Image (cartoon, helix red, strand yellow):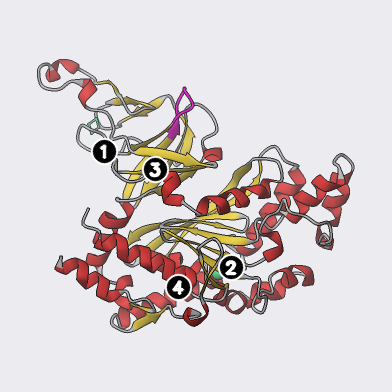
Amino acid sequence: SDRASDFASLAAEDRVAARLYTDPEIFDWEMEKIFYSTWVWVAHESEIPDAGSFKMSHIGLQPVIVNRDRKGNFNVLLNRCRHRGASVCEVPKGKANGFTCPYHSWSYSLEGNLRGIPYPDGYEGVAEKRDLPLQRLRVESYNGLIFATFRTDIEPLADFLGDAKLWIDRFMKQGAGFPVKVQGEHKFRFDGNWKIQLENTTDGYHFPIVHRSWMASVDAETADMLSFMTDEEAVTHALGNGHSVAIMVPEHVDLEDDDGTEELQERFRPIIDELSETMPPEQVRRIVRSMHGAGYNLNLFPNLSLSMSFFRVLRPISVNETEIQHMALGLDGGPESVNRERLRIHEHFQGPFGFGTSDDSEAWDRVQRGAVANPEMPILVNRGLGREVAADEGWKTSHVTDETGMRESYAMWKRMMNDDN
Ligand code: FES
Ligand code: FE
């Protein structure tokens, strides 16, 4: 259609129009063509550990409830009563037997079935309960990550994730033998388009520049660990379907792979001593080498990044506003002191008073202000275009400071926006 070719012309291989961040019509199409047409991450299984556990989440602009029922199945339900459309849940997280709408008390089971209607005689011959469940979405999970989609006709989740699965598996190894759990979270909003965050996850180029103040605040060993600008093994792979991975600490790509030569960081000495009293040295090494999380950021199109030791979730609010949620990860059943230290590391960078969040969001605000002022001026995504190579796995690969991940995201964006289905 004309519309589709309009969009195509806005995103070239090496640049995109700033209008992609500012045009409300493009935003509406993105909700339809991207967020309501693919698998979107909604929860980690550790957030809903028991039968009846639930959390609120979103797919694009649509509020959903994610829960675990008595059979242990995950359900994702549109948070909208079938009577007159009120939301049936406003509690961010908790435990329940079901959901009751506050307006006229229609009540629904964890599976979304309509169980009760007060004063039902008015509905005789008019409506049947079995015809009015909460809208159920298709749901599938991979290695603890729960995704849902409005679409019944798209590929299984595993196919959509494709080569990203290997990187999810490696990421979860930071549990060092324990399952990974969400151990705290915070949210904030910035005045900018969601794709500014999408681009940021694999933007290795900005790291030592925007985060200079953070770099100046850490010990020499940590600074050295993240000195990837001139490290040839620090690369970004484009994994297909919009997904990409930016490797910042090449020696931590696979945390199980330990040749014993890496010295443990001195700052963790008290923890090393404590753990060594009860654990074998290999396990202590594994836990301490995993303290900063995986050695990379994995961008899962369109809304989740698995970044070092946390999840970063983006939620589009409007063309000019985005919510970011950071979830700190810990070891489920692991040592208290380790989980505490991991939280401190998270707060230092990602926390509300941390260096990373404030520095990044200031830069994103500036990008958006520039786009609003001049929407036809292009945004460049061409860094490293001339030095991309095809890796053995078939991935497009370049240095971690290159914009290979952004190009992968925009190739998928373009494909989905042009898709007629
Ligand atoms: Fe939910 Fe009436 S709107 S019961
Ligand atoms: Fe950053």
Q: Place residue 333 in its image quadrant.
A: top right
> Residue lying farthest front?
392
The residues bearing labels 1 and 4 have C-alpha atoms spaced at a distance of: 34 Å
Of mark 2 and mark 4, the one earlier in the sequence is: 2
Residue shown at the point (64%, 58%) measured from the top left: 346
**Three-letter code for the amino acid on which mark 2 is drawn:** Gly
User: Which numbered disc, 3 or 2, marks the residue closer to the eye?
Assistant: 3
Sooner in the amino-acid sequence: mark 1 or mark 2: 1
- What kind of element bears circle 4? helix
Q: Is residue 245 left or right of residue 105?
A: right
What residue is pinned by disc 2? 356
**SS at badge 2:** helix
Query: Do the numbered discs 3 and 2 sit on residues whose CB atoms are within 8 Å?
Result: no
- What amino acid type is highlighted by mark number 1? Ala
Instruction: Judge whether 173 appears above or below 116 on screen.
Output: below
Q: Nearer the viewer, mark 1 or mark 4?
A: 4
- Dot 3 amino acid type: Pro
Q: Is mark 2 within 8 Å of ligand 2?
A: yes
The residue mark sitting in front, 1 or 2, is 2
Q: Residues within 10 Å of mark 2 (few under 14, many from 20)?
A: many
- Quadrant containing the N terminus in the rendered view: bottom left
* Residue indicated by mark 4: 364
- Point out the tag, 1 or 3, that comes first from the N-terminus: 1
* Residue 295 in sight from this viewpoint: yes
Label 1 residue near ligand 1, CB within 8 Å: yes
Q: Is residue 297 above or below residue 334?
A: below
Dot in front, 4 or 3 = 3
Magenta region, residue range: 67-73
Q: Look at label 4 and name its amino acid.
A: Trp
Q: Callout 1 environment at 10 Å: few (<14), some (14 to 19), or many (20+)?
A: some
Q: Which residue is mark 1?
A: 86
For the point 25% across and 63% down, the residue is: 418
